[in-house]
Image: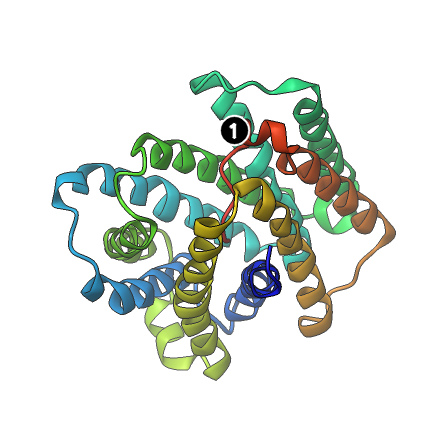
Amino acid sequence: MSPASILMAIAVPTLWGFGFAISKAALGADGFPPILLTALRFSVTALALVWFFRPPIKYFRQIFVISVVSATIQYSLTYSGLDGVDASIAAIVVQLEVPFAAILAAILFKDHLGWRRALGMVLAFVGIGLLAGEPRVQSNLFPVFLVASGAFVWALGQILIKKLGGKIDGFTLIAWVAAFAAPQLFLSSWIFEEGQWQALQNVGWVGWTVVAYLGLVMNGVGYTMWYHILGKHDVNQVAPFLLLVPVASVITAVLFLGESLTPLVMIGGSVVVAGIGIITIRRPRQASLAPEAKVDQ
């Protein structure tokens, strides 16, 4: 990989990890309800992108289903969980997306797991078990369950995307998933949440800055660079850089949100990241068997 590609491969997970953590600052009593925040995020993405990509009308049904699963349900679960637990802990728990995706691929596509990936899965779940011993987690088990559920739903969404077989380019898919997801999320927020109008009126510049960052930087700039890198290099070359996502999230949570890292959180998080690394990093001769790269939060 060239120095420019390496810099972009580092920048993308850093942008994504930073964005996941600062989402916490836009939630809570002084911010947006979590589903409303997600609705605004996808609205910004849709408004920025749909004008540049022709509607793939032939695949609207599949895109609609993908938007329900991988956007509306997944982000509603993930951000509702994030609202009730520290961003540093949520950033680690959400990494269960990778073992969940590998398990579903093995079941539905008969992908070969092998002992290395099986070991990585075991380590990832052991790490989450260690996190469960943290007092902050024990008092917030339901939000952690929501984040873990969101990770599982994300894996389901990737199965649906894979079934498209690359018939739609990544940018078009992002644009129109966002266009379908935004109204669904506004409706879901209206049904399940309250205080939306007050939040829209009273949230400060931090909340609106987070919305712009999530919609334009995470979804727009992040995906633009990511697909550019994937177009030039093998997945097994760039996927390991995604291990920086939880690292960037945790660092951001500590430095900007004032969260603390206990020894148990550090040990559990390290075990999870090690397990994800074993699953993600593939030897060259195994590149054809590598799972699809994980994307942003």
Residue at the image point whose x is 56% and y is 32% from the top: 287
Residue placed farthest to the bottom in the image? 205
Q: Residues within 10 Å of mark 1 (few under 14, many from 20)?
A: few
Q: What is the x, y in percent for residue 61? A: 18, 38
286 left or right of 219 in image: right
Q: What is the x, y in percent for residue 277? A: 69, 40
Res 40 → quadrant: bottom left
The three-letter amino acid code for the residue at tag 1 is Ser
Instruction: Inspect this view and state whether residue 4 appears.
Output: yes
Residue placed farthest to the front in the image? 2
Res 5 → quadrant: bottom right
Q: Nearer the viewer, residue 120 or 252?
A: 120
Res 227 → quadrant: bottom left
Residue at the image point whose x is 46% and y is 71% from the top: 213
Q: Nearer the viewer, residue 10 or 19?
A: 10
Instruction: State the residue position of label 1.
Output: 288
Q: What is the x, y in percent for residue 180? A: 24, 51
Instruction: Inspect this view and state whether residue 132 appears.
Output: no
Vertical side of 3 occupied by 123: above or below: above
Disc 1 secondary structure class: helix
Q: Nearer the viewer, residue 97 or 111?
A: 111
Residue at the image point whose x is 81% and y is 51% from the top: 266
Colour style of the rendered protein structure: rainbow
294 left or right of 86 in image: left
Q: What is the x, y in percent for residue 124? A: 70, 35
147 left or right of 109 in image: right
Vertical side of 89 occupied by 112: above or below: above
